[in-house]
Amino acid sequence: MTRELPGSPLGLHRVIKPAGALPQAAWRLDPSPELWPDETRVRVDRLNLDAASFRQLTEAAGGDPDKLRAAVLGIVAERGKMQNPVTGSGGMLTGVVDEAGPAAPLGLAAGDRVATLVSLSLTPLVITDGLARWDGRSEQVPCDGHAILFGRSIAAVLPDDLPARLALAVLDVCGAPALTSRVVTGAKRDGGRPPVVAILGAAGKSGSLSAVAARRAGAGLVIGVVPNQSEADILNVTGLADQVVITDARDPAALAEAVRSAGGPARVTVVCVDVPGCEGGAVLATAQGGTVIFFSMATSFSAAALGAEGVAADVTMLIGNGYVPGHADLALDLIRAEPGVRQIFDSRTAEG
Amino acid sequence: MTRELPGSPLGLHRVIKPAGALPQAAWRLDPSPELWPDETRVRVDRLNLDAASFRQLTEAAGGDPDKLRAAVLGIVAERGKMQNPVTGSGGMLTGVVDEAGPAAPLGLAAGDRVATLVSLSLTPLVITDGLARWDGRSEQVPCDGHAILFGRSIAAVLPDDLPARLALAVLDVCGAPALTSRVVTGAKRDGGRPPVVAILGAAGKSGSLSAVAARRAGAGLVIGVVPNQSEADILNVTGLADQVVITDARDPAALAEAVRSAGGPARVTVVCVDVPGCEGGAVLATAQGGTVIFFSMATSFSAAALGAEGVAADVTMLIGNGYVPGHADLALDLIRAEPGVRQIFDSRTAEG
């Protein structure tokens, strides 16, 4: 069943309030299942909450699975999408295409198994099973329901050669290695030599992918920063970083000194940790004229802007855009080719 | 009177809580007047609250000057600095150097009339006159008190040929024209032709400076976006933009269409408006492969990151760093050379 009037490729027709907002910025969307002609409806089987959101929700619920389920259900019922009101972030989903409208441009057909590459924070969503199959211990949330893709949304058909759970986790962060690759390539070109790259949170999912992307893009030295010995052990075993340092990324002076002593300061610093308060340290760990890429949804805009100014740091600071052309294929290629990254993803996406 | 132990050039020794934070990120600083050897103390005569902070405080106080004074005094008393807890931002100050510690590297001497180029959000501050001379109607706040500059803080000696009030307002936003100039220069070089530049809030202070900086850096077309006819009149009279469009920057589809019809999409979009919710429109108004520079302290990191991803926009998004080498001199040169910008500043910094 589809509607007759054309929709907006951006999904503006699904915004209930405030009027005129884009779906991502809106407070509430219309998630009803009837399609506008260029939309596609997906039968959802799994949500993958973003790390910053899952952490915030878990802390707010005191770790209680019932409270956590109620919180997610409450948000989706109230907003028509899964957007954490505190972090503003969402995550992504997998499912099977149910119906594509007659004018849908995404190239998807009923029966295709897909992952969305646009955030849950702008995707109309209805959950119908009360999240009964979710134990609340993992950001991967089995569920039944439906979601709507707009004309300009992005979705990837899941590859046959990788477990769905793994592919979903990779696609969720695929913007990070793609943008890291682009920035490191540019730094090498402009600087005339292979740049030093520091990855904060290098033993995590976006961090490990970014580390190998940096190396492949021509980094001269990859410094992996992790918060504790167990993550350092993972990095050392997998060999994803040339240097591994253990430090609290929220302690600016300690972070800058740790990166310096490992071969820094960095020409490119990539922030992949999901805790607040890493802006100042990332800036201080970066050489004058260098670049910081913030991928963490816990990043504070004003803390970064004023923090750099406050220490007279001439660094370029990038808001990590989740979309770079070719990002899905690049990330899936990395997980196939790099056993160290695969190992990290397997351990972090194991059934909780 | 100075202390004996060396301080940290970053001011870490002034942080009361949380321990280890940089002064900008700290909740509370020690603003006591005794100097560490590399510090400089300034006798403050005026604060210049940043636009986003002043707007938020004014709205929270319902426009009541007594409540506004009490709010600012309360923040400074509690935090030891003027950092708006909601926006995270501060502003800057002017004053006269009172004493420079024996190891102070800033090149300032007692009696120098200066403006700070680091944010109030990291500057230890004590107010001693109860803000009795402030009418609460302007972000420029006459006051008595003292402030502390660290070894790595930045301050500019105020020029003799410009009124102090004007110089302060120019220096407050001097990072914007400097970074705009750098980005437009790069876009022209990489794109092979003069880029289209859109300035959101072009009739404001940072906007007007950024507009002329863009033109001088080689923009092919400068599109000034303003919210109403009176600001359009200002822009038209001053001639700072080649095209002037009136639209609400918070309405993404309307903004994108307005910029397109004026000669866009933009290769470089500069966000100088101090209201929240302009992220999506700025992204949509920008060409694929283009750059958005966010100078507004009202910018939401997650709204920008997820908004770009949500519309599959391959745009580079920069956090507007307030520090670029040479920024103060560039901005002061622009205000001297460009009567249109001077006119805007004079009208916006007139005694309220």
Image (spheres, coloured by chain):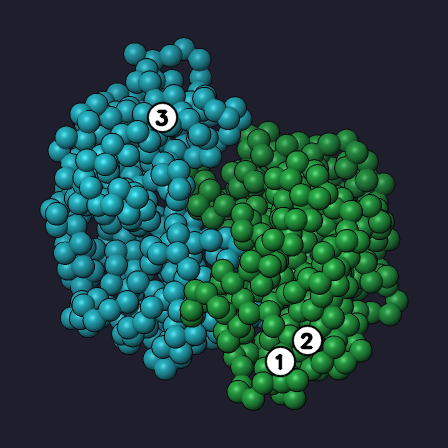
Chain colours: A green, B cyan
What residue is shown with label 2? A41
Is the C-beta separation of discs 1 and 3 under 8 Å? no
Left or right: residue B30 versus residue A280 is: left
Q: Mark 2 belongs to which amino acid? A: Arg
Circle number at residue A35? 1
What residue is shown with label 3? B78
When asked about the image quadrant of residue B88, the answer is top left
Q: Mark 3 belongs to which amino acid? A: Glu
Tag 3 subunit: B
Left or right: residue A59 versus residue B181 is: right
Q: How many marks?
A: 3
* Residue at image coords 43%, 74%: B253
* Both labels 1 and 2 in a single chain: yes
* Residue at image coords 77%, 72%: A96
Quadrant in which the N terminus of chain A appears: bottom right
Is the C-beta separation of discs 3 and 2 under 8 Å? no
**What is the x, y in percent for residue A128?**
71, 63
Q: Name the foreground residue: B274 vs A104.
A: A104
- How far apart marks 1 and 3 lie (CA) works out to 54 Å
- How far apart marks 3 and 2 lie (CA) works out to 52 Å
Q: Name the foreground residue: A20 vs B331.
A: A20
